[in-house]
Amino acid sequence: MTKGLLYISTLILLLLPGRLFAQQKPLMSQYTLNKYVINPALAGATGYTNINFTARQMYSGFQNSPRSFLISANTRLLGDIHILKRQRVERNSSRASRIKNIGLGGIIFNDRNGIMNRTGMQLTYGYHINFDGNYQLSFGLSLTGYQFKIDDQNALILDPDDPLLQNNKTTFFVPDANTGIYFSGYGLYAGLSITELFGSSIKLGANQFESYESMRHFYLMGGYKWAASKQIFLEPSFLARGTIDRVELDLSAKLYYQKIYWLGFTYRTNETIVIMAGLSIQEFYLGYAYDASLGAIQTYGGSSHEIIVGMRIGENSTRRFRWLRPDVSEVGE
């Protein structure tokens, strides 16, 4: 640890209360294109197989500013499985069991903020209940594990006796879990998820710094997607997210044209506006978001950029799910 200065991320750890450690959890502006990232109940909820890559650069005018990358996939199990069953007369027989209510998903992610790096994966099980052929209630549970690493090769120690540096440990493994519930039907959707259920802690340095523990985050979302005409679709939505200490709100509106193009706008209560645009060609889609701060940080390069590239497989196989209205739900899920 003999190079460079401890960057902004370490200063935040020193200046803020320990329990605020997990508030550096990455934020995604285009969550409506991949709701599974913030709510595990979305694993398989749409009936499609969704594969998604997201890259985000925050505060692009600052060196070593936060950046995030993730690859996610989720699907619905639609077929039959055959379960081998032993009869009382010691005879084996096979019976078919429907598994169309089950969804599976996974995420691989990497987040970097200055000298701090987080790399891990998430595995998800989802279960979906259909009501009256028109509405669906979904539940999800994810297990997560990630490696938290401090890049000590790019840090200059100004004070060798700093208690933050006393235990010389720079790599940690953090297990955790997320859970969620999601309701959808006829263009309407709402969901609630809670992450960091374990409240795992990371010990940095001497004992007085041992309370850097992950705070539970919650995400409450809702929206309605409806056809204004044969060519135009509208989607107002909201996302409330935060911890027990702080809550932020996104208010969004998106306009879709011909099921191909879309434009969107978000106002975030932390004085940020987001402009989004994208297009969908057959099973592929591409989205871009530009975040601009309304505060003083914008003068110094406080804008953020986010890009999503994805594909949705199974266009013709999902008609068995009647709640997926073809005139509404196929527009940018």
Image: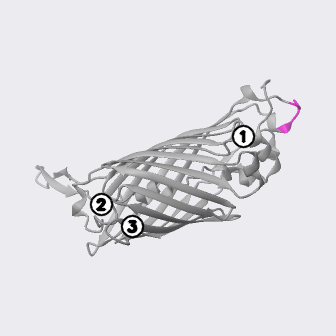
**Mark 1 or 2 closer to N-term?**
1
Residue drawn 32% across the image and 67% down it? 129
Report the residue at 65% width, 53% height from top.
292
Which comes before the other along the chain, label 3 or label 1? 1
Mark number displayed over residue 101? 2
Quadrant hosting residue 275: bottom right
For the residues labelled 3 and 2, say whether their Cβ atoms are less than 8 Å apart. no
The residue carrying mark 3 is 233
Q: Amino acid at mark 2?
A: Asn
Asked if the stretch drawn in magenta spans residue 17, the answer is no
In terms of depth relative to the viewer, which is nearer, 47 or 204?
47
First in residue order: circle 3 vs circle 2: 2
Q: Position of residue 258 (x, y in %)?
A: 34, 60
Location of mark 1 (residue): 62
From this view, report whether residue 244 is shown above or below residue 116.
Answer: below
Q: Secondary structure beneath disc 1?
A: loop
What residue span does the magenta drawing correspond to? 158-163
